[in-house]
Amino acid sequence: MQVMTPRGPALVEIDDVADPRLLLVLTHGSAGGVDAPDLLAVRAAALAVGVTVVRVTQAFRVAGARAPGSAARQDEAWEIVLDEVRALRPGPALVQGGRSNGARVACRTAKAVGAAAVVALAFPLHPPGKPERSRADELRGAGVDVLVVNGDRDPFGVPDAADAARLVVLPGEGHDLKRDPARVGEVVAEWIVRYA
């Protein structure tokens, strides 16, 4: 399904379950897609515990761009997509999330879209080699509980446990979280069901 935004169309893929406990909306990072190994693992684990999963390819990626542009424009487009998704699936509580840049969007827009919680996979705490440019304020400013799942070898850094409701650091994982994506899915599914 396509949702038109001021930045062009976004693509929405919905995996429904019967009588969903929760609605989980996920998106990708700057250069990736919704078929990243960690996102697919989270999708599978969430479906297995009775959660409807929506994966959103944001408009900038549909247009072929590798950079999302301004945060304000990206967030505006995200909120339009979420309004449409909620109109289609109004019942269950909403948890939203994403990997890397998508995790940042989910944190920044959580309150605006009425999310109960955020799942932040590979949250990019700072640009590689530039710890002075911290994005921890986005985690702290989410206004809802945030689960952060990062690898201990992530060049974008690992957030402080105090900046999230729960921080899970997976040994041996880098920014792509692809060594053991099934473990990422298990961590997320176990945590999100409390918001059902």
Image: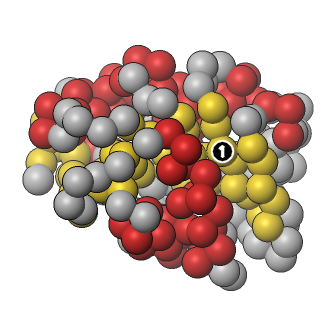
In the rendered image, residue 188, in percent from the top left (x then y), is placed at 58, 58
* Residue name at image x 74 percent, y 35 percent: 164
Instruction: Residue under label 1, please give it.
Output: 147
Please identify the quadrant where the C terminus is shown.
top left
The percent coordinates of residue 140 (x first, y second) are 71, 24
Whether residue 88 sits left or right of residue 174 in the image: it is: left
Query: In this rendering, does residue 68 appear at all?
Result: no
Residue 132 in sight: yes
Q: How many marks?
A: 1
Residue 138 position in % (x across, y down):
66, 27
Say which residue appears at 37% left-offset and 24% top-offset. Answer: 113
Taking the spot 58% from the left edge, 78% from the top edge, the residue there is: 182
Is residue 107 found left or right of 66 in the rendered image? right
Give the residue displayed 23% in from the left and 36% down from the top: 91
What SS does tag 1 mark? Answer: strand
Query: Is 60 situated left or right of 182 in this image?
Result: left
In screen coordinates, is 196 left or right of 132? left
Place residue 5 in its image quadrant.
Answer: top left
Q: In the rendered image of this protein, does residue 34 appear above or below residue 98? A: below
Pinpoint residue 40: horizontal percent, then vertical percent.
43, 71
- In-front residue for pair 64/120: 120
